[in-house]
């Protein structure tokens, strides 16, 4: 993998269901993996910054895992609510380009009541 | 704390014109990065300013230039606008001087080139 890839591109979830989606990134020169939640007409909101292989982060009903050796991260939403509807972006940072975020195209999540 | 602010919110320009976008970083932050988000894509890194100098640059032509002021605020200038420059321009601030790399984003400026 040469770039950051996110799948699926979009997701429709029933309220109360749990869901997850993937961010894949190049495994060489890894420095950090960022997750953002971006609601329409608002600023992207930082969810997690992950740096260590095997790292797990949690914020309320949202959690993320990181595998730097194979180059992927999963984001999980437990018991989805309509307010979880947003585009979730992951961004990769390398050791030789520190401070520069390389973004995926995002996963758009729509939670219906 | 006002967070990261950007102005203007929306802008319409004609092909060939020049545009200046502005960004004020979050309080306590000394680094500003600019990103371009075209429709259907993730944000693309344009450049980053720290200590009033361009520290890193993405794959954008010289028509894209910037500046950082002593109060850490920043401007993005685009000359000779093309239709393809129509996009959302995001500014992000961070505290590079403190050794942290978390970036906080503003709401963006929507540029339309006609």
Image (cartoon, coloured by chain):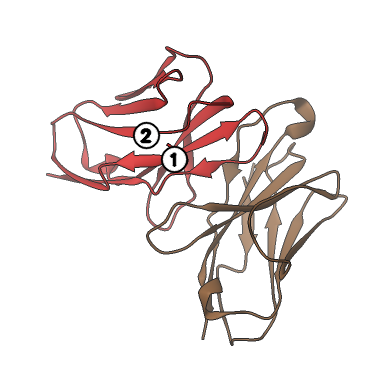
Question: What is the drawing colour of chain B?
Answer: brown
Q: Position of residue A44 (x, y in %)?
A: 47, 46
Residue depicted at 29% across the width and 24% down the height:
A61
Q: Residues within 10 Å of mark 1 (few under 14, many from 20)?
A: many
| Viewer-nearest residue: A65 or A94 | A94
Label annotation for residue B86: none
Left or right of A100, for residue B40: left
Tell me the residue that label 1 is attached to: A4
Q: Quadrant of residue B85?
A: bottom right
Chain in red in the render: A
The local secondary structure at tag 2 comes to strand
| Viewer-nearest residue: A111 or A7 | A7
The local secondary structure at tag 1 comes to loop
Q: Residues within 10 Å of mark 2 (few under 14, many from 20)?
A: many
Mark 2–mark 1 Cα distance, whole angstroms, equals 7 Å
Give the answer, above or below, for where B114 lies relative to B88.
Answer: below
Give the answer, above or below, for where B57 lies relative to B61.
Answer: above
Tell me the residue that label 2 is attached to: A23
């Amino acid at each position: 993998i040469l770039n950051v890839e996110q799948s699926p591109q979009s997701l429709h979830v029933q309220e109360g269901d749990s869901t997850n989606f993937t961010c894949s990134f190049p495994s060489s020169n890894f420095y950090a993996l960022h997750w953002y939640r971006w609601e329409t007409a608002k600023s992207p909101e930082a969810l997690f910054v992950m740096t260590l292989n095997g790292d797990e982060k949690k914020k309320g009903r949202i959690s993320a895992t990181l595998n730097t050796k194979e180059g992927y991260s999963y984001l999980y939403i437990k018991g989805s609510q309509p307010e979880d509807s947003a585009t979730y972006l992951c961004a990769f940072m390398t050791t030789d380009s520190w401070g520069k975020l390389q973004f995926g195209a995002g996963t758009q999540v729509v939670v219906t009541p | 704390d006002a967070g990261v602010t950007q102005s203007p919110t929306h802008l319409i320009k004609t092909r060939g014109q020049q545009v200046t976008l502005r960004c004020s970083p979050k309080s306590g932050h000394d680094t500003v990065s600019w990103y371009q988000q075209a429709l259907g894509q993730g944000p693309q890194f344009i450049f980053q300013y720290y200590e009033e100098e361009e520290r890193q640059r993405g794959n954008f032509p010289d028509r894209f230039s910037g500046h950082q002021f002593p109060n850490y605020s920043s401007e993005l200038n685009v000359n000779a606008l093309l239709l393809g420059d129509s996009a959302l321009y995001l500014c992000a601030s961070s505290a590079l001087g403190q050794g942290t790399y978390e970036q906080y984003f503003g709401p963006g400026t929507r540029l339309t080139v006609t």
